[in-house]
Amino acid sequence: MNFFKLNTKQNNVILNLKELHFSEENRVKINKLLEEFTYIDTLKKYNLPIDNKILLYGATGCGKTATANAIAKQLNKKIVTLNLGRFVSSKLGETAKNISDIFFNAQIDGSVLFIDEFDFIGKARDYENKDSGEMKRLVNTLIQQIDNLAENSLLICATNHLNIIDPALLRRFQIKLEYELPTYQKLNLYYDSLLSLFPEKINIIKRVYKISYAEAKDIVYNQIKSNVIQLEKQKKQLLFSYGTLQLDNVQIETYGRKLYGKKDILMGYRLDNMQIKDESILKKSNQEFHPIAIKSDISEEKIEGKIFEINTEELLNTDLYEVDDYKRVLETFKSGLKAWVYIKK
């Protein structure tokens, strides 16, 4: 039975490195890494080592995973993502073997191996517990695999808790990139870049600070979605009524206001009567029988009524008013207008 799952494809859009927000120090270190891999063959001629072990640490939601994917994309390498929190099994001996297999397979293709939640396995543990022997073997296996990593492969590990990782593991990483919460100015730039993707009528949001980029992105998208839905609710809709929706009391009960309508004619339909049994509908209309439009075989048959202008939210309220025997369709009327009308299912 497998206790792990490797993700070799990402569901989200992978950003380019230039699209990510780095400190100047981190950007310099990443550019140096990319240069070494670009000129790896030349460096090997001089027996110069390649820095291919990177540790990303710091605040959550600040771009560690995005960085790993962007580096792999820039180097045109496949990325193998391993989340240790979901990987480590209760049988620690099997976990050590599985980690060895993962490193081996990643190196065959010269892939980027990205280990997230690195502290889950690399914690400075109290080895006096019952699993002390197993845990020591596990950490030793990881150290051995890191030390023997092929130079054409790249190991990227990420953690939110640098202080609890075994120092013996930390020493193995030539490059360490710290991720901090963005400043007020950097968050403003990030907000501006996200909001520029949307029209002005929906990109008004309340900005929040002292949070990560990921949290800021969620705030933007949630507020934008709310703005879009609100705008859609207010979108103009035309509704043709041939029955009780023309009554003032029904309109007030349904929409909270009286509607202004223009007379129009629906061609190719005829009217029939339908008995209403829903008590809430009967209370609004005070009519036991409601008219219902039925598609006719005779094109000259017609139904007279009025076309009202309402918004999308009010249209949805109308759906609740009409009983299940009706369905809403979009038709063209004698005036040339297109409007919604409720007809027999």
Image (tube, rainbow, N blue to C red):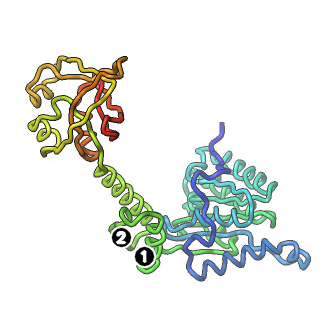
Toward the right, the furthest residue is: 45
Q: Is residue 288 above or below residue 144?
A: above
Depth check, front residue: 217 or 182: 217
* Residue at x 24% of width, y 43% of height: 314
Element assignment for label 1: helix
How many marks do you count on the picture? Answer: 2
Position of the C terminus, as image quadrant, is top left
Q: Amino acid at mark 2?
A: Arg
Whether the residues at callouts 2 and 1 have beta carbons within 8 Å, the answer is yes
Q: What separation in Å lies between label 2 and label 1 (alpha carbons)? A: 8 Å
* Residue at x 56% of width, y 59% of height: 117
Toward the front, the furthest residue is: 300
Disc on the earlier residue, 2 or 1: 1
How crowded pointer 1 is (Cα within 10 Å; few <14, some 14-19, many 20+) is rated as: some
* Residue at x 8% of width, y 26% of height: 286
Q: Is residue 278 above or below residue 232?
A: above
Task: Give the residue at mark 2.
Answer: 207
Residue 321: where, in percent of width, then height?
A: 21, 32
Task: Give the residue at mark 1.
Answer: 188
Residue 342: where, in percent of width, then height?
A: 28, 29
* Residue at x 30% of width, y 54% of height: 230
Location of residue 153 (image quadrant): bottom right
Location of residue 339 (image quadrant): top left
